[in-house]
Image (cartoon, rainbow, N blue to C red):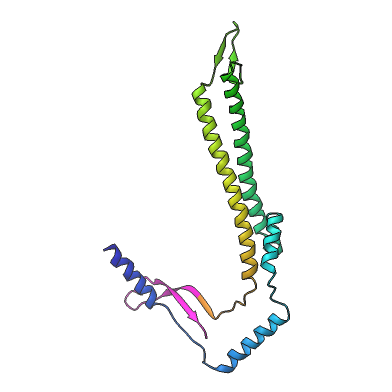
Amino acid sequence: MFLKKIIFVFLIGFFCTNLSAQNDSIKPKKIKRIARFQKNAKGLYNPLAPSRAAFYSAAFPGMGQIYNRKYWKAPIVWGALGTSIFFYLDNNNEFKRFRRAFRARSNGFQDEFTVINADGTTTETVSVETIERAQEQLRENRDLSLLTTAILYVLQIVEASVNAHLLQFNTDDNLTLRPTFINTPVQIETPKLGVTLKYNF
């Protein structure tokens, strides 16, 4: 029953699309192609732009986005990388702290989790098992933060390169896809939401 509903919604969306075409003439198409090649010959299309954007992003994160003139993306890159680096450093420091305590306690020395009482006796506020579990958890969090930082670094390089490549495409209204409200004569008060696909050739 659920599959029938999905197929029904898909068919309604498909039949609600509106395909429109311009007059089929050869001259305007040829003129468009010639103009496009002339623009490319004048140097508006730069094949080295994607590699430059990737190089700038690899040298300094966010610089590729600035090269593409997408200035609003640079703070997002810096914030994401800064957050993952912060968590890496914080987890690494805590891991070293518990590691030092574990080594000191294993060798019979006092650590920061050992409290000296007034009568000279010592009390362990944290057990050895808790310190071991804390080390494992902090090591896992540290490695995950490092992996996240590496993934974000690679993703911002790929994003800058792809964006520099896509910015050079000639985008126009030949192909548009936008949602529309469709009024049916049966249900006038509740219009249906459909999708209009317009392709001009």
Figure check: 48 above or below 15: above
From the top left corner, tell me how far across and down residue 194 is, in percent.
41, 73
The answer to whether residue 68 is seen in the rendering is no
- Dividing the image into 4 quarters, which one contains the N terminus? bottom left
What residue is drawn where x is 52% and y is 84%? Answer: 200
From the top left corner, tell me how far across and down residue 57 is, in percent.
68, 58
In this view of the protein, which residue sits in the foreground, 137 or 185? Answer: 137
- Verify whether residue 184 appears in magenta: yes
Figure check: 79 above or below 25: above
What residue is drawn where x is 59% and y is 28%? Answer: 99
The answer to whether residue 138 is seen in the rendering is yes
Figure check: 137 above or below 74: above
Residue 101 picture quarter: top right
Residue 18 picture quarter: bottom left
From the top left corner, tell me how far across and down residue 144 is, in percent.
55, 43
Q: Give, as a single range, the part of the protein colored magenta.
A: 177-201
What residue is drawn where x is 60% and y is 76%? Answer: 171
**Residue closest to the far right:** 42
